[in-house]
Image: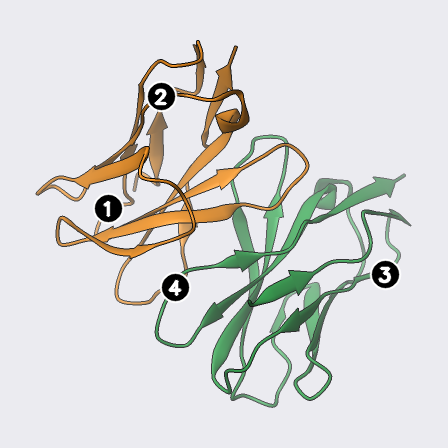
Chain colours: A green, B orange
Amino acid sequence: AQTVTQSQPEMSVQEAETVTLSCTYDTSESDYYLFWYKQPPSRQMILVIRQEAYKQQNATENRFSVNFQKAAKSFSLKISDSQLGDAAMYFCAKANYNTDKLIFGTGTRLQVFP
Amino acid sequence: DAGVTQSPTHLIKTRGQQVTLRCSPKSGHDTVSWYQQALGQGPQFIFQYYEEEERQRGNFPDRFSGHQFPNYSSELNVNALLLGDSALYLCASSLAGSPLHFGNGTRLTVT
């Protein structure tokens, strides 16, 4: 069975500092997508960043970037210049290449302190 | 441009009852997926509808069923509710493999 593991239930960061959230996954596929989603108290899942496994270059979206290590099956999210609005649950997720069915991790709660 | 809308936002039901949750996809999207998110957990895939047919299904019992209408909107039905069905139910829509767009969910409480 495919699994996505987030080993950090909670993380905290000072405003303007950098924080890294960890994610590992298990798969036998060579082509797949990896995602980080943010879930604020409004409950809506918001896509933060997406990585295609066949691309070696790490994805970046403004203050958000990933460190994708395919051989190690690791996909961490780095948030730079943290803002109070970044406080939320963050979920790592994986989808096989020919489907958009997502397998989620258990989430990491990020707190941002002023 | 309206995003994914779900109704109702909250619902309280009694064990054994049946419930119907509704979802309208983002404009232009033709595929609807449903997820169940138990408290403190990540969402789990229930099923996906495309062209009014169930295209994929997760590991959920037959008590969970769905429907997609010609306008791409969708319903999730759960029969014979159990206490363990209490969760946030998320609907997501997509088009041709584009990233999923999620709604704000329906919080179902079974007493």
Report the residue at 53% width, 20% height from top.
B83
Label 4, on which residue?
Answer: A100
Label 3, on which residue?
Answer: A18
The answer to whether residue A8 of the structure is visible from this angle is yes
Q: Which mark is residue B80?
A: 2
Q: Are marks 2 and 3 on the same chain?
A: no
Which chain contains the residue that carries disc 2?
B
Contact check, label 3 and label 4, Cβ < 8 Å: no
Cα–Cα span, label 2 and label 1: 33 Å
Label 3 SS: loop
Q: Are marks 3 and 4 on the same chain?
A: yes
User: Label 1 crowding class (10 Å Cα cut-off): few <14, some 14-19, many 20+?
Assistant: some
Foreground label between 2 and 3: 2
The amino acid at mark 2 is Ala
The amino acid at mark 1 is Ser
Q: Nearer the viewer, residue B71 or B61?
A: B61
Report the residue at 35% width, 21% height from top.
B80
Label 4 SS: loop
Cα–Cα span, label 3 and label 4: 30 Å
User: Label 4 crowding class (10 Å Cα cut-off): few <14, some 14-19, many 20+?
Assistant: many
Return the disc, 2 or 1, that comes first in the chain's sequence: 1
Name the spot of residue A89 as percent of width and height, x first: 69, 43
The amino acid at mark 4 is Asp
Cα–Cα span, label 1 and label 3: 36 Å
The answer to whether residue B73 of the structure is visible from this angle is no
Foreground label between 1 and 4: 4
Contact check, label 2 and label 3, Cβ < 8 Å: no
Contact check, label 1 and label 4, Cβ < 8 Å: no
Q: Are marks 2 and 4 on the same chain?
A: no
Cα–Cα span, label 1 and label 4: 18 Å
Which chain contains the residue that carries disc 4?
A
Cα–Cα span, label 2 and label 4: 29 Å
